[in-house]
Image (cartoon, rainbow, N blue to C red):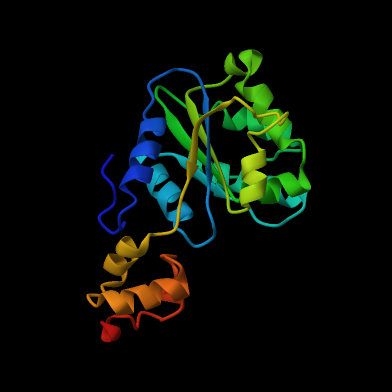
Amino acid sequence: MDKPAEMFDRDYEWSELTRFVRYPGAEATLGVVSGRRRQGKTFLLDAVCRAAGGFYFAATEATEAESLHQFGTALARHLGEPAPRRFAHWDEAVETLMAIAGSGPVPVVIDEFPYLVKASPQLPSLIQRALGPQGQRRSGAVRLLLCGSALSFMGALLAGTAPLRGRASLELVVPTLDYRQARDFWGISDPALALLVNAVVGGTPAYRREFTLGDARRHR
């Protein structure tokens, strides 16, 4: 799985994600990805799904019924089905999701996972059950990746007495770019200017497009 040419740096993050996705075991596995907003988490996970033929679902702030409808629509589209899947509860949706892998490992990404849990607090427990001995008998080689920007929430998923404690094979934090990486990313040759830019945007990749509307190179 080659890293997309348009992806700057993130070599470590890409290698960890591809190692997780390509694990050849027949059992389902869990990974947790977190990081501050605008660091490129979605770009990374969407690229991994595209490269490996996986399923990507981005949650929104919605009620449980609305989220289930959105999820069923996205899953049917991924599976090439003409009509949305209809799920009354998340236990049925999780069981269906964990069984979509065919003959080999399949990445499954649930982005903005905290939005779903806010409306459906039982979701971590349902995923725990799906990853347990009984659930594994009905599951395929799904490589489930839960992602979110709420750092305290994502950290708590695997801490203390949380249902998913001890379940994750991957815990990946996507950081901001450091000073040298940000200098190269912005295409700045002047070290003093690079330091000032980094002090303002904090090494956040997305700000190059959003703060400057593409007008970055005139200030080299």
Horizontal and vertical percent position of residue 49 = 42, 43
Quarter where residue 163 is shown: top right
Q: Residue at x 67, y 40 (%)?
A: 156
Note whether residue 218 is visible: yes
Q: Residue at x 31, y 56 (%)?
A: 7
Q: Residue at x 72, y 44 (%)?
A: 117
Horizontal and vertical percent position of residue 71 = 63, 45
Quarter where residue 219 is shown: bottom left
The foreground one among 213 and 181 is 181
Q: Residue furthest bottom?
A: 218
- Position of residue 178 relative to residue 76, above or below, is below
The foreground one among 51 and 212 is 212
Q: Residue furthest left?
A: 189
The foreground one among 113 and 36 is 36
User: Seen in the image, is 177 located left or right of residue 94?
Assistant: left
Q: Residue at x 73, y 28 (%)?
A: 161
Horizontal and vertical percent position of residue 190 = 24, 78
Q: Residue furthest front?
A: 192
- What is the quadrant of the C terminus in the image? bottom left
